[in-house]
Amino acid sequence: MINNRISQAILVSGESGAGKTESTKMLMQYLAFMGGKAQAEGRSVQQQILESNPVLEAFGNAKTVRNNNSSRFGKFVEIQFDDNGKISGAAIRTYLLERSRVCQISDPERNYHCFYMLCAAPSEDCKKYKLGEAKTFHYLNQSNCIELDGLDDSKEYTDTRRAMSIVGISSDEQDAIFRVVAAILHLGNVEFAEGSEADSSMPKDEKSQFHLRTAAELFMCDEKGLEESLCKRVMATRGESITKNLDPRAAALSRDALSRIVYSRLFDWLVNKINSSIGQDPDSKILIGVLDIYGFESFKTNSFEQFCINLTNEKLQQHFNQHVFKMEQEEYTKEEIDWSYIQFVDNQEILDLIEKKPGGIIALLDETCMLRNSTHETFAEKLYQKFKDNPHFSKPKFSRSDFTIHHYAGNVTYQTDLFLDKNIDYAVNEHQILLNASKCSFVSSLFPPCEESTKSTKFSSIGSSFKQQLQSLLETLSAIEPHYIRCIKPNNVLKPAIFENSNVLQQLRCGGVLEAIRISCLGYPTRRTFFEFINRFGILQPKVLGRSHDEVAATKMLLGKANLTGYQIGKTKVFLRAGQMAELDALRTEILGLSAKKIQTKVRSHVARKKYVMLQHFATQLQAVCRGTIARWRYETMRREAASLKIQTCYRKHCARKTYKEICSASTTIQSGLRGMAARHKLHFYRQTKAAVIIQSHCRCYLVLSNYKRMMKAIITTQCAWRGRVARRELRELKVAAKETGALQAAKSKLEKEVEELTWRLQLEKRIRADVEEAKAQENKKLQLQLQDLQMQLNDTKELLKREKESTKAEMEKTLVPEICVDTTQVNELTAENNRLKALVVSLETNIEEMKQKFGETDNVRDEWCKKATDAESQINELKSMMQRFLFH
Ligand SMILES: Nc1ncnc2c1ncn2[C@@H]1O[C@H](COP(=O)(O)OP(=O)(O)OP(=O)(O)O)[C@@H](O)[C@H]1O
C-alpha cells in the first residue's frame, strides 16, 4: 500500500467457526501496530479501533451450534491512513444483524452475549435494572445453554464497559444502553392471555404485569401506552384509522417485533457511535479494508438470514471469480499473450435469480410484503411459478412453501415461513410513537420521528437494503486491490488437533480455492507494465536503464539476468508465473542489500568522519568550556579570597573599632569616675576646709568672745571692784550715815525671813493638818468600822460564851453524870477559846484607848503651832509697819 499507493482490501471468508473474526482481529492488531501513531494525548485511534471489537462482539456475537462466539453480523472495517502510512481514521460498516435471535433461540445456542453479561453484572447494577438470574428470562431460557465454559460473563461485563469507555461511550450512555437491554429482557417475560373482548389480549398475570411495568420504567415510557402498543394495532384505511385488538398470539408477536427493532436500533447506534468516536479522515487517500463476513450457511432449517448470508457469499464469490478468473483472462486476451482460456463456474445466474430487478427473489419478496393478506405461501407460490425453469432454483418434493437454490457452494433449502416478517424493516407505528416519546433521550433518539412522506410512500425491506449495502461494498472492493484469506475449519466439534479431510476438501471446493490455485499455477498471477518492471528491477542490470534499449528488450534482459523462463511478454505488460516475482524481488533485495552495504559503508565512514570532526570540534569546545569553567572557577576563588580578605579586614576593623570604642567608653567612664572621685575628694576637702574654717572661725570667735567676755568680765569685775570699792567707800560712808537704820534693816530682814518661814510652815502645817484631818477621818472611819466589828465580834463572843455556858450548864444538869460524861479535851478547848477572845477584847480596848490618846496629842501640837504662827504673823505685821515707816523717813 505504501509503495504503490493503492488501497487494499482483505476479504476474510470461510464458514462459521472457521476463524474469520479471530483472523480479522489479528489483522487489525497488526495494522494498528504497524500504522499506529505514538500514543498521543488520551486514547489513540488504533486503540479505539481495537477496543471496538469487544463492544461489537458483546452486542453482535452469540453462541451457535458451530461457534461459541459467532459473529451474527458482517463487518467491514476501513482503516484510513495518512500520507506517512499512519492510521488517521477508521470506519466500521456492519451488515445484517441477526435480529430474530433476540426473541428466538434454539437449544443449545445462546442469545447475544450482552444479555448474559448484564444478568451477571454486579448486584447494584442488577438491582438498578431489576434483573434476576438469566434463566428466569424467556428470551434466554428457551435454550438450556446459559453459561459457557471458559467464559465469565461478569468479567465480560466489566471488560465491555471498559472497552465502551475507551471507544468514547460515556457512562450515562452505557447506563442507557444496558437499561434498554434489560428492558428487552423484561419485555420478553410479558405473556398475554385472552382479554375481556373477543380476540383481545392483556398481560397474563401479575408477573407479566410486573415485567411490563419494569420494561416501561426502563424504557422511561408510559406503561399503559406500552401495553396498548402491544395489545392493539391501529389500522389506517382511506383517511380513517381503526383500532384493532390483537389476540394473545399476535400480541406476543408484536412484543417480539418491538424487542427486535429496539435491539437492532441499539446495535446500529453503537456502530454509529464508535464511528463518530474514532472519527474519519476525509483527507485520507489510501485505506486498508478488512472484511469479516459470515460464511456460507446451510442448516437443517434455513430462514431469511441464511438467504441473505448466502447472497453475500455469492456476491463475494462473484467478486473473487471476476478478479481471479474473468478479469485475469480478459487481461491475457487484451495483451495478446499465448493463452488457452480456462472455464470457470460463473455464479452470475444465481445472483440474477436472487437479486435481479425486477423478477428476482428479493423483488418478489418485497412485492409480496407490500401486498395485503399475502402469506409466505403466496410468496412461495410466486417463486415456484416464476422460477420453475431456472436451473438454479427448485421446489423440494415434500414441501409446500420451501424452495431450494443451487448455490455455487451447494444446494440450500429455505423455509419461507418467516421470510415476510423478517423482510419488513419498519417499526410498528405504535412502537415508534411510544418510544419516541420516551423521557429517556437515548431511547427516543433510537426512534426518531419518521417523515410522513417516507412513512406512506416508501416501503423499505431488509432484503433490498441489504442488497444495496452489498452493492456498495462490492463497489468499494472493486476500486481497491483485493486480497483473500480463506479460513478453513478443520473440524465441526470445535476441538483442537482434529482434521476432517472431507470437510476441509468441501470447504476448499465451496470457496473456489482449488480453481484459484489451478489458475495461479497455470496462469500469470503477476503482471507489470514494462515501465514499472524496468523501474523496479532495473537495478539488476543498470545498463538497461540507459536510453539505448527499448522496453521489451530491457525487460527480456532483466528476466534473462534472473534466469527466468516461462514468462510471457504482452503488448504493454510482462506476465510472470507464480513465484517469479518473488525470485526477482529476492534478487533485487540482494542487489539492494549489497548496494545498501556499500552505501552504508560510505555513509558510515562519512558519518564516522563527521562524527570525528564533530567530536574534535566538541572536544575543543568542551576543553574551552572546561578551561573557561576552571578559569572562572579560579577567578571566582580569587574573587572569593579577595572578598574574604575584605570581609576579614572589615570584620577586624569592626572588631577593633568596637574594642576601641569599648576601651574609649571604659576609659571615659573610668576617667569620669576618677574625676568624679577626685572632684568628690576635692569637694570633701573643700567642705572640710570650709568646715574647719567655720570651726576655726567659731573657735576664734569663741576664743575672742570668751576673751572679750573675760575682758568684759574683768573690766566689769574691775569696774565692779572699783565701783564696789567706791560703793563700799560710799557704803561705808552711808553705813556710817545709816548705822542706826541698819539694825532695823537687819531686824526687818530677820523678821521677814522668819515670816517667810512661818508662812511656809503655816502652809505646810495647814496642808499636813488637812492630810491628817483626812487621814484621821479615814482612820476614824476605819477604826470605827473595826470598832464596830470588834464590838460585834465581842457581842457575838459574849453571846456565844453565854449560850455555851448555858448549854453546858444545861447539859450538865441534864445528864447528871458529872465527871464521867464530860469530855475534858472539849472543855480545855473551850476554855482556850474563851481566853483568847478575852485577850482580843482587851487588846482592842487597848487600841481604842491608844487611838484616843494619840488624837488627843495631835490636837495639842497643832494648837501650839497655831499659836506660834499667829505670833509670827503679828510680829511680821509689826516689822512691816516699821520698815514702811523707816523707808518713809
Ligand atoms: N487462529 C486461531 N487459533 C486458535 N483458535 C482459533 C483461531 N481462529 C479461530 N479459533 C477458534 O475458533 C473459534 C471461532 O472463531 P471465529 O469466531 O473467528 O470464527 P468465525 O469464522 O468468525 O465464525 P462466525 O462466522 O460464526 O463468526 C474461536 O472462538 C476460537 O476458539
Image: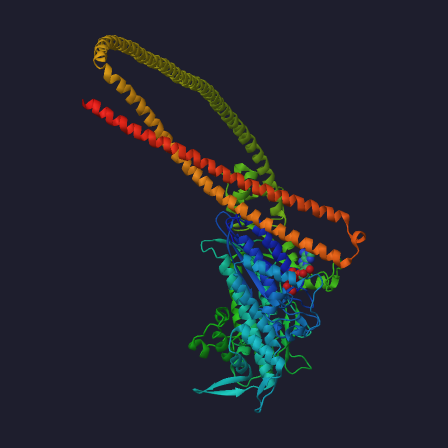
Residue at x 76% of width, y 47% of height: 825
On the rendered structure, is 35 left or right of 133? left
Foreground: 144 or 357?
144
Q: In this view, does 602 lie above or below 110?
A: above
Furthest residue in direction right, as rendered: 820
The image shows residue 220 at horizontal and vertical percentages of 52, 73
Can residue 330 be seen from the camera position used here?
A: no
Residue ID at (55%, 64%)? 174
* Colour scheme shown: rainbow
Q: In this view, does 549 lie above or below 885?
A: below
- Residue found farthest to the bottom: 198
Q: Which one is in front, 310 or 140?
A: 140
Report if residue 107 is visible in the image. yes
Picture coordinates of residue 344, whole percent (x, y) = 62, 63
Q: Is residue 339 left or right of residue 80?
A: right
**Residue 667, located in which quarter of the rendered image?**
top left
- Tell me the quarter of the image containing the C terminus: top left
**x%, y% of residue 846?**
57, 40
Indicate whether 693 appears above or below 129.
Answer: above
Is 639 in front, or is 153?
639
Q: Residue lying farthest left?
A: 889
Picture quarter with ligand 1: bottom right
Q: Name the spot of residue 52 as percent of width and height, x first.
A: 56, 59
Q: Give the number of callouts.
A: 0
As displayed, is residue 135 above or below residue 149? below
